[in-house]
Image (tube, helix red, strand yellow):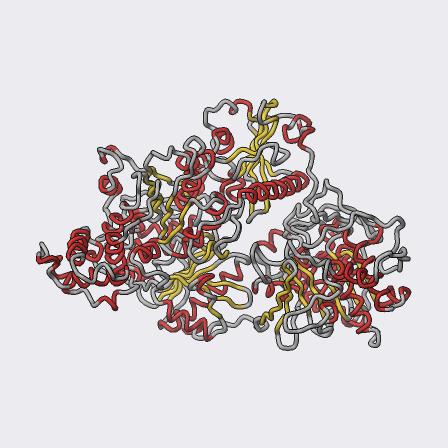
Amino acid sequence: MARISDEELAYEIATNRSYLRALERRLTRKNPEISVTANERYVDNVPRGEQASVGPLCGRVGLAGPDRDLGVAFYIGTRYLNSADWDYPVINWAARAAKVFFDPHTTYKLDTDVVVRRTLTARGAEVVHASDDWAVTVPADQSPFKAEKLHVPPAPPRRQAGRPTGPTSSSARTAASPDHPAGQMPRTRQATLTGPAPSPRTPKTPRTPGTPRKEPPSPVSPAARRAAVAGEGTAGRLPLPGKPADLATWQPDAPLVIAFSEDSRADPEGIAAVRAVDMVRHLARERRRVLVVTAWTNQLPKIVGRVHTAAALVGLPAADIPKILTIVHDTEWLVGVAGYPRFTDTREPDALDVGLYVKDIVEQAVQICRRRLGWAQRDVPLSAKLEVAYEVIRMGGAPTEPLKLGRYSAEWIATLPPFRAAWGQLRYLALFAQLVTLLRTPDSRRPYGHVIVHGEHELSGLSCAVLRANNPTAQWTVLTNLGGPGSPTLDRRRTIDMAERLSVSDDLGTVEVIAVRGARLIRHTVALPPPKAAPATPPGVHDRAPDRQPEPTEHRQRSASAAVDLENGMRAVDAVRYALHAPRTEAMTSVLATLQPDQYRLVTQPPTMPLIIQGHPGTGKTIIAVHRAGYLVNEETTKKKGRIPRVLLLGPTEQYVRHVSRTVRELDPTGAITVKSLPEWLAELAGLGATTVQPGEGTAEDVGGFIVALAKRAVAECQNRPEWKTSRPTDKVKMAYEAIRSNDPHGRPPTSQTEQRWIEALPPFPKVWGKRRYLPLLAQLGLLLSEKRSRYEHIVVDEAQDVSELEWEIIQAHNASGRWTIVGDLNQRRRLDIGHLDWHELAKRLHILPDAQLFQPEIVERGYRSTQPILDFANRLLPPNENQPCSLQTDGPEPSVIRASTPGKRDLRAVGEASRLLDSHPGGTAAIITTDPDAIDKLLLSNGWRRTDTAVGAGDWTMEGRRLAIRTPDSARGVEFDGVVVVEPRYFVRQEEFAGTLYTSLTRANRELVVVHSKPLPEPLTRR
């Protein structure tokens, strides 16, 4: 597999954006919305009723010769698009022709013509990585991806972002070339600031930034001219709710953040210009300057023109503008700071070159140089300092004083060329600008009094750091994009990230944000977290028992060769490894591009074919379940039937629903799939509505099959009562429940002592309301009482090993056609006394085949999620005769096992380790899994963490922009995190002979696992 060039990646990024716009236009014509039954409150944190999301392109296939329908190359996407919708053929991922991409070993008419398969890995809706699998070696000029008809498409409207080829005048630059689309690298432009499209006109003669330009006579009135500056139809004023003041002049001494939606009627460039002129007037007496930095070269002429128009309206002499106002592109400004003479190489930087951690590395290097070389006592030229400091970075520090590096920073340093080769390259411009900033004395800098950032979301973290370091006393006006679809305001996390990047806040530690959506303005204040303190050793850690690292097991000796064996039959191995090493997110990211042949075959089985899939943790079972549901409702699968079937996808928890909902939305924009957690669904059937389900374990009798007969007799007895017909559904459930408690429903006693003891132990109805233990009983009563029940053509059940006999009875009653997809792992069962002992028993129970003994479950064995060290540690809990799972991730740190002397110190260490995991996996996720979440919650609250709103994520805590998940063993099922801290494993094991709950919790970690305990570990975990 070969990684494609940056130019080809830029092409695919722009093409994908064009495809998404075309797909959105097509779906908008059909006006689809998310079904409210998919999640009554939220679907992937998006309020119900919002427009469905669309998935990105996932692949591309090149042929040896042109096909009559598909041409020489075609794309694979989530939805089919024909030539009337888009310029290029896009095959639906569920179509038969897509098999040549997902299953290279299949037999299909196009298979022998395939030359190359390109896998497009996406993050959200953006393509971030691409790699090619060549089936046939051909000369570069004969590649099917270089065909004449496949030239790079124009960049998205208002998203052109040309990069300079040298420190030329900003006003002389024109719009970006369409052959250089926005956002071609993770660092570079991802989206433009929304608002009216920029004018295509270019100034006829070059002029330097700030130079006055003679305005032609205008036939319109001054009021109309002012309206043209600030926004369409606003007459120059955008009134704030509760504060009738001009937006441009509002609080000149306080930071201001303005976020624009795509349908905003305001003009961002005009508002930037009006704000700039107003700040010029405000700071004139203090002789302080104003800086306007924009992320786009094609917006510079427009801003300059707006500035002169606004200055003329307030009577500011045009000749005075250049003296106090600078308008510049961000790259040109960095060139001025770094002192680049010219660009020797204009290749774009990648994410490693401009990460915020580069700022910390530069600070360490400069401090080492000052201490060891005595620069404070010697007059050393700046150029010499610059070269020495750069080489210190490149060498990783001094021989006796190395730099403190993380994994990504170490990878980045290893790629640095010598100083002479690096100096003048565009990709290292921000690095040299930061070096020069720190090497200069503070007196040599000329900070601005006010900085206006136009397109903040397009600037890298390192560029923002340089901007702030050169203007430490400035006030800020930030123009950026509004949050996600449907968001009325800029979300708090984005605001905090932006404030930290630019150190934007007022004296009270708050930021005022104005969101412009359409013609409406919404003002809100965001309180920022206190400044991050230096990390300290958690209290009580000094007297804990010594840390113990488990030694590598003998299984490690076979892990490398086993991983090679696992790659047999795979496709897009490079893309899979890239995705596995990417940070985890709360929501499942798009994995359609890396769907493997064995997974694709299971997903695309005929809808009438029953499936039971068994697999160890991290083997992609949930991915198969979700894509199977998407395949069943896909337009390619259902076009012969003429209608889309209703599909129910049941998961174990609400956290699981949030985890998979975004992918479901991409695969099913019409809302035919209903996604529910089993407890939530049972509560709805019982008529509990939005009642919060209280966790709790019951007995095997609480979910026994005999309850069905008891419930039927109780309902039959209650129907003869006079008050029955006039009672509400909830009252009917109560009456039937109390009839069961009466110990003699319909005059017939229970048939066994087990039933008798269970009935006698039932509490009064108010005490069972909302408790998880009694949900199956109440749901069965509600099912018998309902006059109209939801019927589904296919039901997909994930984590099926924990579904009880009574719950299967309820689920089966909603399956209209008897079609099933059942996914689970018998080794992860919470209890042995609930559920079925093997899959054959379940197949017989559900009547999947006439002879259930002939039915064989599908086995998936390839591990994706956890590293091999984590799996080896967790595998100690498996029975001796069980197959030991292997992972594609052979590398990774050994799980840490930490002993604390007391439960209090144990919990303190758990929180400290979770914080470390968040720092070690920036942009990723971490979780604490514990049987006592209340103790951890109290500790987090006392240490400055704040719990998020339950509608967004129950059990999640935030501090300083970081998010930590607190999970119980039950709520951790079906989800994953970069790092996991498991607290007190002894309490996870309810049955000594079986530790399925603990096994599940240990395997939630993708990259790093920590076990903290004060009680003895379960015996299997102490083995070597």
The residue lying at 41 percent from left, 42 percent from top is: 629
The residue lying at 24 percent from left, 50 percent from top is: 835
Residue 445 makes an appearance in the image: no
Query: With 897 as the anchor, is 148 left or right in this view?
Result: right
Residue toward you, 416 or 821:
821
* 776 lies above or below 945: above
Location of residue 692 in the rendering, given as x and y in whole percent from the top left corner: 36, 64
* 965 lies above or below 842: below
The residue lying at 73 percent from left, 66 percent from top is: 237
Tell me the quarter of the image containing the N terminus.
Answer: top right
Query: With 630 as the anchor, is 828 left or right in this view?
Result: left
Q: Residue 288 appears in which quarter of the rendering? A: bottom right
Residue toward you, 804 or 54:
54
Query: With 490 as the anchor, is 222 left or right in this view?
Result: right
Q: How many marks?
A: 0
Residue toward you, 294 or 830:
294
